[in-house]
Amino acid sequence: MKKKIIRITTVPISLAVLLKGQLKYMSEHYEVIGVSSKDKFLKVVENQEGIKTHGINMTRSISPLKDLKAAFILYKYLKKEKPSIVHTHTPKAGTLGMLAALFAGVPHRLHTIAGLPLLEATGAKRKLLNFVEKITYSCATLILPNSFAMRDIILKEKFCSTKKLKVIANGSSNGIDVDHYKVDNVSTKEKNDLIKKFSIKAQDTVFIFIGRIVKDKGINELITAFNEISKTNDNVKLIIVGPSEKELDPIDPNTEELIANHNNIYTTGLVEDIRPYVAISDVLTFPSYREGFPNVVLQANCMGIPCIVSDINGCNEIITHGHNGLIIPPKNSKALKTAMLDIINSPNLVNTLAQNSRQNIVNKYRREFIWEELLTLYNNLNDEKTI
């Protein structure tokens, strides 16, 4: 009889997208159950990963009464299922899941850190988030930061000791399917349709942003830089791929207006497959303020396009300045503008960065590396004598 592992995220799209394939792989060795808030993506997870799922509603925002209710429901569910390991992802699921797992007597309680929203908070909110973070870490038996720089930040903030921390493989929560993210997988028709849709000419330089349209992703700085460049250069395009989240982290009204009215800025909303959009682009621009280990940088590089990224953890571990991309200071539209102009004015630079991009990902971040090392960790934990 297989031992049981319960994986918990706040919303099920995290199970479906961020951990795609991993749960199916683990289910060959363990009974895996996915737990997340109730919505249609739970059924997607079941069909895609071939595992059982269970819905328990959790909010992404701070909501003490709802959070206590969710933690209690989780506790009862874990007491009933008696897993050997509970492994959580995302901040809210981490806090509620680790707390519930501790009281339910689960012997191995793992939490993956894929970013720390609290790093951009200040004042009383920062103190509250720090306190909640420490609760999560104290309830866990092992913390898995998904980058080495994230591990250093955790130690600097004194959230837990070194012995409680482990980075899996070279970083990332799930690695990348290097066979899926190949330019060759995008048909000529798909590319031509998008080129026509966005009125892209042969001489254009196409920048792409992929992610949530929020302040913390550096959207304000990106739009400011692009708008200034476009005043003196007609041959530039910016494609923004991703959903807006106005209620959580709104961008400036001026930025919203520019996105809506600029002739050379195009938005797509949330798309199921980013590959055609990457395939028609020259460079990913990703000036985020904070990350864990950004999948979009892995995906773009894997498809052979260089990236302009902020000098923050995760980004500066994937990108080496001048080798497979350019690194700029965070929250700096002037530096971003300079880097984008370097791309526009230096075709040889772009070619060099592009040639180095894919192989770096293939060598270090294949998803199989992550899966195999995580499975070894699970096996070692279950082999230990637990009290």
Image: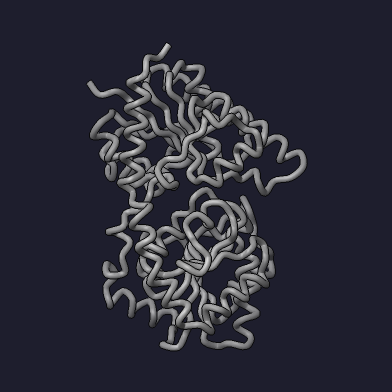
Q: Where residue 18 appears, x then y in whole percent?
A: 41, 47
Q: Nearer the viewer, residue 127 or 313?
A: 313
Q: Where residue 120 appears, x then y in whole percent?
A: 67, 49
Query: Coloured how?
Result: one colour
Residue drawn 51% across and 33% down? 165
Total count of labels:
0
Residue drawn 46% across and 34% down? 88
Q: Nearer the viewer, residue 270 or 83?
A: 83
Vertical side of 311 occupied by 11: above or below: above
Q: Which image quarter is the C terminus in?
A: top left
Residue drawn 49% across and 61% down? 319
Q: Could you tell me if residue 257 is visible in this image?
A: no
Q: Could you tell me if residue 169 is visible in this image?
A: yes
Q: Residue furthest top?
A: 387
Q: Where residue 337 appears, x then y in whole percent?
A: 62, 75
Q: Nearer the viewer, residue 69 or 12?
A: 12
